[in-house]
Amino acid sequence: MQKNKKKVMFVMPSLGGGGAERVVSIIANYLAEREYNVNICLLRENNVAYKLNNNVHVECIISKSTNGIKRKLQTLRDLRKLVKKNPGTVFISFLTNENLYLAFSTLGLPANIVVSERNDPYKTINGRLNRSIVNLLYSIKQCKTVVFQTNGAMEFYNKKVQKKGIIIPNPIKKELPEIFVGIRRKEIVTFARLEPQKNYPLLINAFELFSKKYKDYTLGIYGKGELEEQLKLLVKEKGLDSKVNFYGFCADVHNKIRDAAMFVLPSDYEGLSNSMLEAMAIGLPCICTDCSPGGARMFIKNGINGILVPVKNVDKMYEAMDLIASDSKLANELSQNASKIKTHLSVEAIGNKWRALIDNL
């Protein structure tokens, strides 16, 4: 192995549960294993939910101010000091707020930064002014590359930003269980944060229709979030208490669900869903909404390795669930074909894309 690799600093709000956080932990470990000097700077919470290589250093510059404006200004000052103290470092931020903090804090400095969009900018960047600010900061000379997960997300930005853009999908972590062989449990599963963009009421409403025909099936929801109590209330109102289980956050979720009947993701929008990719990788028959900015359709070939349904369409969601439950041959074909994604999006394949990006800066 070559010595004296570049120093890399990831900038994140925290490393608590979440898709972007998981990707950072995977890429950070991958780089550290190849003797890069890897650091992670946390701006909001000193929370690390993912296992990190012993050579990955985590530091925090979390403002203690309770005043929103003062807190933001302190974060910018501290981040600028950090950039000055680490000349030659490649700074990589994930998530829009952190991207803007990093870009703004490097104005006038000889810095090399990479920003990475992890959600749907059409939904998360509202208004002409905000769009202009993001385009402006992503266009500065310090910002060398903008990483996107989908072409649809890249197309949101102006031509100057697009010229800096590259597509790097999410990696699929190595420690996933093998595809299940046998008779699957009659449980529909999903795992993600319980937040508005995931539109879990759509899934619950579709399951209500489904359970009238398939009375022995249950629905398992893994994850925590702001809508947990509302969703539980909705389940109770529909009389589905005995059929819908809320399991909370589960670090071992993939082993828990590998023999389930199917995985369903009902999101209104997604950057690129780790849950979907991981469910496919372990061979679950998958149903996903064909949501903006096109992450699901990048990897799901409808009817071949999964099923795409329109956003916010309860009837189409129910029909897809019915199709998989009623056709075991199709379910098996979807399962086998979906699992092939594990090779295409391996940690090595995606990690090498990040290495090439970093080494060329």
Image (spheres, rainbow, N blue to C red):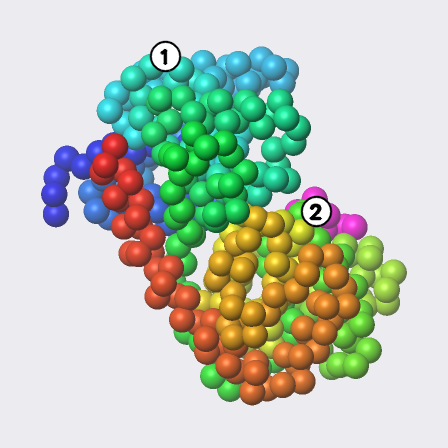
Q: Which residue is mark 2?
A: 196
Q: Residue furthest left?
A: 2
Q: Locate the C terminus by quadrant.
A: top left
Amino acid, disc 1: Gly
Residue at 43%, 18% in the rendered image: 105
> Within the magenta stretch, is there residue 225?
yes
| In-image side of 74 versus 351 (left or right) | right
Question: In the rendered image of this protein, does residue 39 appear above or below residue 247?
Answer: above
| Horizontal arrangement in the rendering, residue 105 relative to residue 216 (left or right) | left
- Residue that badge 1 annotates: 108
Mark 1 residue element:
loop
State the residue at coordinates (52%, 47%).
152
Residue 57 location in percent, x, y?
32, 35
- Identify the residue at horizontal 58%, vertical 28% (top origin): 131
Say how many tags the image has: 2
Q: Residue furthest front?
A: 159
Q: Is residue 40 above or below residue 218?
A: above
- The answer to whether residue 78 is seen in the rendering is no
Q: Position of residue 150 (x, y in %)?
A: 48, 49
